[in-house]
Amino acid sequence: MGKVMFRDLYFGQASAETEVAQDPSRFLKNYYDRWNIANRLGRKDFFLLVGPKGAGKTATSEYIRLHLQQKHGKAHVFAKTLNLDEVSPGVSPLASITQKLVSDQATGITDAAWRLFLSLRFFEMLLSDESSSLANDPQALDLAKRLRNAGLATSDFPSVLRKVRENKISLSLKGLLTGETASKQTEEVPVSALGQSLERLVLNAQSDNHFVLSIDGLDRIIGHNPAYWLTLAALLRVGEDFHHKLISARSSLRFFVMCRSDVFRRISFADSDKIAGDSALFVDWGSQQTEPRDSPLWDYLAAKAEITPDALFEHFPPHVSVGLRSSKPRNIPTIEYILTSTRSTPREMTMLMRRLQEEVPPGGYVTSDRIRSAVDTFASRDLLTTVKAEATGLLKSDIAEHLEELLSSLPSAREVTRDDLGKSVVASGLEVDKTAELAEFLFMAGLIGNYDRNTGYIQFYHRRDTYKFKRTGPWQLHRGLMYAFNIPYSRGAANG
């Protein structure tokens, strides 16, 4: 068989959901399991998936589901993914929760609401399994009916939270609980304590099948509402406790939460470091090595295309020529040029490869000019769109609305100073004190990196997140934004 043309290689889709919907078997077969998830699932050593936008958290969740289905049979795996739109339908969005419902002084109520909400979801999943002990228990079926009548069974989280806070509902769990609670079986359980009882019920349920509950979309509805961040902190706090109980009970239930890195950083509570250290999988493709060729993202792309990284590299010219209109044109190694034009995430590498395939005609080859054109298109269409979406909710609206204007007015990509950024802020009609917030967002988003004048070394958060942000500057602007806004690389130079 002859060599497959670059245009005919398969690099996946930007959306894991789309890729799985199109061909789940190919997705599973070509998934690059960098974190040895297949083995870690048996140990249940994580429930929280943390990573930047586009790093593959949703793809990892889909892989977990498909892997379990392949291992145990599709009929023996019950899986449900809740995005925030499903967790909180439009009439009661999570971001609309106010301090009337959630506050530092009432964290126990929020925790109790999440415990009840998660237990309700698992209870529903177990009832849908005809072979489970709960599905064959008349008392459990009767409880399900009473939960529906009480407006709890299908409620979104804000609705459950309100009911727990009001604490006006009580339900009897007679005959459903055993052990130390046996003496209380005839008593009515108030809704504020119902989560603990229902949690015990699902943990003790018997089934030969497997259950996966995933919560995704924590980067879709975010904002500056303090109550919202307290709500997410409660989810992770309760989630970790639930996760450990599932392990201790040797339960066939599994629970996962996907969370964006910059969102997780905003969620502040006492045990956040412990959760990050003991129960989190960091979906991070940033490479600590200095050689772009060694980035695991090439292994990711090669796995999708069903070739080796070296075979993929053979499609590329050795260098990409830039600055052809300047007095000092440069040749940048192609592998470095492509990698640094993205923010080192699978989604952006896939999007750039697909843009490059659009530039290559049928039967044609990858050239320096075609790579530059693909990067320009990727930067101006895909990267900018993604950046603006990420800014929504994390940046105050007045800054987010001026983001393109703020970035395009920078004098150069190299050695961006705090004063440069401040002038852009003022020129956009904003107060200069917005500069610090903008700079920190750009760093967390991997759009500027710390620049060391003495060594010329650049530290981007998305590639080396162990480095802390250098708030005083100077910084280096991301290559993709430099091309998107036609910003010169250095002061007084033409952009190549």
Image (spheres, grey):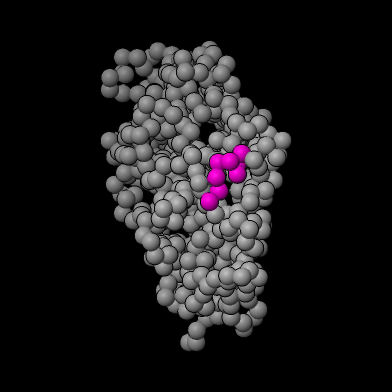
Residue drawn where x is 61% and y is 50% of the image: 386
Give the residue drawn at x 43%, y 19%. Answer: 108
Magenta stretch contains residue 421:
yes
- Give the position of the C terminus as an image quadrant: bottom right
Direction bottom: furthest residue: 1
Residue occupying the point 29% across, 47% down: 43
Residue 396 position by quadrant: top right
Q: Residue at x 58, y 29 (%)?
A: 224
- Work out whether residue 182 or residue 4 is closer to the camera in this orientation and state it: 4
Residue 188 image position (x, y, % from top left): 43, 13
Q: Position of residue 333 (x, y in %)?
A: 48, 71
Towards the viewer: 7 or 421:
421
Q: Main secondary structure of the magenta part?
A: helix
- Is 470 covered by the magenta stretch? no
- Residue 126 spot, x, y in % from top left: 44, 38
Image-based side of 293 in relation to 149, left or right: left
Residue situated in front as seen by the camera: 46 or 494: 494
The magenta-colored residue range is 415-422
Whether residue 405 appears in this view of the structure is yes
Asked if residue 392 shows in the view, the reply is no
Relative depth, front residue between 24 and 293 = 293
Indicate the position of residue 33 as horizontal and vertical percent values: 39, 59
Compared with residue 226, is residue 305 higher up or lower down, i.e. above or below? Answer: below
